Amino acid sequence: MTYQKRTKDQLAARVAQDIDEGAVVNLGIGMPTLVANHIPASREVLLHSENGILGMGPAPAAGEEDYDLINAGKQPVTLLKGGSFFHHADSFAMMRGGHVDICVLGAFQVSATGDLANWHTGEKDAIPAVGGAMDLAVGAKQTWVMMDLLTKQGESKLVQACTYPLTGIGCVKRIYSDLATLACTAQGLKLIDKVEGLAHAELEKLVGLPIRN
């Protein structure tokens, strides 16, 4: 049976599905920012950006961008009623003080037990520093990763042990990918769900690691 990968928007909707009412959530640079577009208007979620915003809404409509109102990735955002701005030092105090319920980050590698590598691959053109990812990974109550399961070369981003510089150790609780949603546990990977038509054995072959049901 054939299967189709989740699109970026389908993946963002899948992440949004698991965000509870009232949660304070930080969406990392890149694909995680799409999650903001899929949170139902009826559900109160406080979106946080490390440059000092709380209460972000979905992306603005074309032509309505305000480049004085941007997220940490320099993308224009909207502000919901009651939203606020503050100094980035206060924003980092929120992150480090355990006041963020969930952070959703991208990743280059995640280990089966939840180690995270998401800031450097050793390439010359890699970003020069870890930024706020380390603060989020250890400060948020839950760290979720949103990513394609495989690299462009077809290699699994889920590994037994990370070979890239670590952002955090044992911090990732869930991995939302274009093929499956997985939990990282002390015993290794555990399946939450997968795309229709993808056999469990085939998923394990792609990942290269055992996955418990």
Image: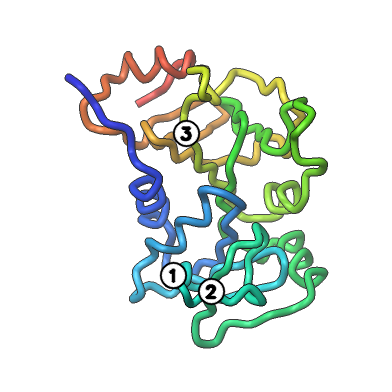
According to the image, label 2 marks what residue? 65
Front label number (3 vs 2): 2
Tell me the distance, in whole angstroms, between the alpha carbons under discs 1 and 2: 7 Å
Q: Amino acid at mark 1?
A: Ala
Cα–Cα span, label 3 and label 1: 27 Å
User: Residue 50: percent from the left, percent from the top?
Assistant: 70, 63
Q: Is residue 184 above or below residue 85?
A: above
In percent of width and height, residue 52 lies at 71, 72
Instruction: Give the residue furthest to the bottom.
Output: 82
Callout 3, which amino acid?
Answer: Asp
Of 81 and 74, the residue lying toward us:
74
- Sequence-first disc among 3 and 2: 2
Looking at the rendered image, the disc whose residue lies closer to the viewer, 3 or 1, is 1
Q: Which residue is mark 1?
A: 62
Residue toward you, 2 or 114: 2
Task: Name the secondary structure under disc 2.
Answer: loop
Q: Which mark is residue 148?
A: 3
Q: Residue at x 72, y 28 (%)?
A: 121
Residue 62: which quarter of the image?
Answer: bottom left
User: Circle 1 — which element?
Assistant: loop
For the residues labelled 3 and 2, say whether their Cβ atoms are less than 8 Å apart. Answer: no
Kindly identify the residue that appears in the image at 75 percent across and 63 percent down. 97
Crowding at dot 3, Cα within 10 Å, few <14 / some 14-19 / many 20+, comes out as many
**Quadrant in which the C terminus appears:** top left
User: Which structural element holds mark 3?
Assistant: loop
Whether residue 22 is visible: no
